[in-house]
Image (cartoon, helix red, strand yellow):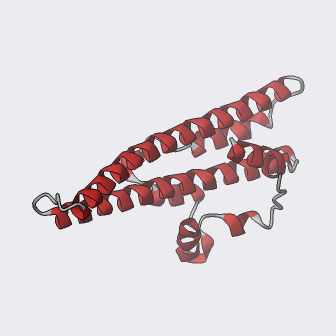
Amino acid sequence: RAVVSRDAVPAILPSRLARHRDAAPSGSMKFETLLETLEVRQFRGRYMPYSTLRKQLAELKSKQPPEAQDAIAKWRSTVQAETARIAAHIETGLKELQVGLAALSKLSKDAAEGHAPPHMEIRSLDAFDNLSDGLGRYRDFAEVNYAVLIKLMQAYDEELGTDAGVNTYLPAMVET
């Protein structure tokens, strides 16, 4: 398991996020605002709920032991469940893209065997374009959620005065 230092985390943020962050005047763009600008319309409502989880995390600070330990464990469990939900959504999308790839492969095979349907070139280009767009949308969806997970684990470390969020829990959640 790789250990990620606090200083290294911004360097591993997805490039798309980094470009938007760098374009913000004086780095003043709030993370929630950045997330809204990067949201893929098709996936609205399916992203990890950053604001809600961030507020819940801030509330954990006011709890006293042993209630605090139970609440922290429950929060981590919620983040883990959200991570699994995101992964399942991506996996479902990739399976749909595989179906599209199989259809494109069949078009290519038919063309190679001389059984090309009318307007085969246009249909092939359209199918390829749909695959490319779909793959890009799922990549963007995964990158934004990964950035949310990083930010949440950084906040976890900051709020609770630990380094386990980024160094222990983040790698474990990403593995699953």
Return the residue nearer the eye: 51 or 78: 78
User: Total label count?
Assistant: 0
Residue at left 13%, top 57%? 117
Residue at left 30%, top 63%? 129
Residue 172: image location, x then y, percent: 76, 43
Return the residue nearer the eye: 124 or 134: 124
Residue 25 lies, with reference to residue 165, above or below; the image says below
Instruction: Tell me if 121 is positioned left or right of 96 in this view.
Output: left
* Outermost residue toward the front in this view: 113
Q: Quadrant of residue 123?
A: bottom left
Q: Quadrant of residue 71?
A: top right
Return the residue nearer the eye: 140 or 48: 140
Residue 124: image location, x then y, percent: 24, 62
Instruction: Tell me if 90 is positioned left or right of 76 in this view.
Output: left
Return the residue nearer the eye: 126 or 12: 126
Q: Quadrant of residue 113?
A: bottom left
For the C terminus, the image quarter is top right
Residue 113 lies, with reference to residue 153, above or below; the image says below
Residue 153: image location, x then y, percent: 74, 48
Instruction: Tell me if 118 is positioned left or right of 176 in this view.
Output: left
Residue at left 53%, top 68%? 16
Residue 105: image location, x then y, percent: 33, 56
Residue at left 30%, top 56%? 104
* Outermost residue toward the left in this view: 118
